[in-house]
Structures are given as C-alpha cells and as structure tokens.
Amino acid sequence: MSLYKDGIRFTCQKCGVCCISQSDTMCVHLFKPDILALVFFLKIDPKAFVDQHCLAVRDTFLFTDCTIVQDRIELRKKRGGACVFLEKNQCSVYAARPFLCKAGPFISGFMYSRLFWKLFKSYCIGVGTGKFHSADEIDRTIAREQAVDEEYENDLCVDPFLKDIFKKSAVVRREIKIDATYDRYRKSKA
Ligand code: SF4
Ligand code: SF4
C-alpha cells in the first residue's frame, strides 16, 4: 500500500538537518542541469566544480527481487556528513540547489521505501506541518524526478562532459539495500 495514499502535510522548516547525511547511503545525486546551474551560480570552471564538489559513485541497489547497478555523480560531504554547500545550517547555493533538494522529501527514495521514509520522519520537523500535498501531487513530483533520472542515465552513456567526469574520477562503490521490488520502486513508470 502506498505510503502517501492519504497525502502528506509538509512544509520545510529550514533546520538544515536533512543537509547532513543521516546514513552513508543518503546523498544528493546531481543531474546534468544541476551541475550546469551550480557552475553558473558559483561562476566556476566546470572541471574545478567537479574536482571540488563532486564524487563519482557506482551504487549497487539490492532490491528484494533483483540487483541494479547505477553510476552517479553526487555532491561531496564534509567531515560529519554535512553537504559541501551547507554553511551555518543554511544552503549556500539555495537559488541553484539541485533538483532532489527542491523535490524532497517527495522523491522515490523516501516515498517508495518504508525504511527510508521512517528514517526521514525521525529527523525532519517539517513532516506533519503546514501545506497539504495530495497523493496526485506527490505522484507528479516523483514522475518528474524519474523523467530527469532517465534522461540522466541516457546522458551518462553518451554525454562527453558526464562521461569525462566518470573517466577521470576515482569511483566510490557502495551497496544499498532497498526494502521493495524494483517494479514497486519505479512504479510511476509502469
Ligand atoms: S530536515 Fe525537514 S525541515 Fe529540516 S531542512 Fe530538511 S526538509 Fe526542511
Ligand atoms: S545543496 Fe543545499 S539544500 Fe541541497 S543538501 Fe546541499 S546544503 Fe542542502
């Protein structure tokens, strides 16, 4: 049964806690438009941006019915797990923050996993407060995420900029257990 079939009340209280990783597997994946927006915002050379702020990762997702391997580019974390852009509990790149930061918590990683949603609720003071978000609205946000994600996966195979980042970076390898079937996790594509 959907975790959000009755909708969710949520308004971000800007406490900054979710910008500090609560587990090794919590991270901010960057899509190509995110990288370009941050490069433009920071007025920095793309290569310097990648060197200073990004990690290339190869994630192995262990679903209950299969295993999926995905290559990703994500934001680096500081010691203690804080996002590289978190300063005094505030996002220093707020106007250019990545797609997943804008869409959260209505992203597949939280909405399709009881385990990750329970973890998020345990530290987010915004859940249960403020604006009501219907199941349809949440579905639309997740569908947008999955469309961007699909485009990114295609880009990663053909886009010279993204391919180059991967080729030149030391790739971090991780295993992530997901308490759902692959179909369930990607259900808005079905
Ligand atoms: S933990 Fe929740 S309330 Fe705090 S910044 Fe993140 S989304 Fe907003
Ligand atoms: S980019 Fe900004 S909003 Fe996103 S995790 Fe980092 S500090 Fe938080």
Image (cartoon, rainbow, N blue to C red):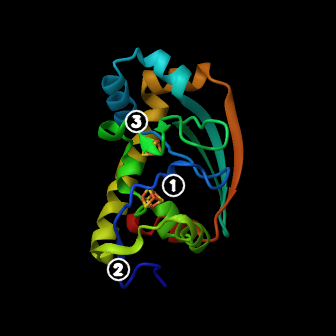
Q: Is mark 3 within 8 Å of ligand 2?
A: yes
Q: Amino acid at mark 1?
A: Cys
The residue under label 2 is 7
Q: Amino acid at mark 3?
A: Ser
For the residues labelled 1 and 2, the Cα–Cα distance comes to 21 Å
**Above or below, comparing residue 165 to residue 6 in the picture:** above
For marks 1 and 2 on the same chain, the one whose residue lies earlier in the sequence: 2
In this view, the mark in front (1 or 2): 1
Q: Is mark 1 within 8 Å of ligand 1?
A: yes
Q: Amino acid at mark 2?
A: Gly
- The percent coordinates of residue 94 (x first, y second) are 34, 41
For the residues labelled 2 and 3, the Cα–Cα distance comes to 31 Å
For the residues labelled 3 and 1, the Cα–Cα distance comes to 14 Å
- The percent coordinates of residue 140 (x first, y second) are 29, 65
Q: Is residue 115 left or right of residue 97?
A: right
The residue under label 3 is 92
- Which quarter of the figure has residue 90? top left
3 or 133: which is nearer to us?
Answer: 133
- The percent coordinates of residue 16 (x first, y second) are 47, 51
- The percent coordinates of residue 2 (x first, y second) are 45, 80
Quadrant location, the C terminus: bottom left
Q: Alpha-carbon neighbours of circle 3 within 10 Å: few (<14), some, or many (≥20)? A: few
**Above or below, comparing residue 85 to residue 61 in the picture:** above
Q: How many marks?
A: 3
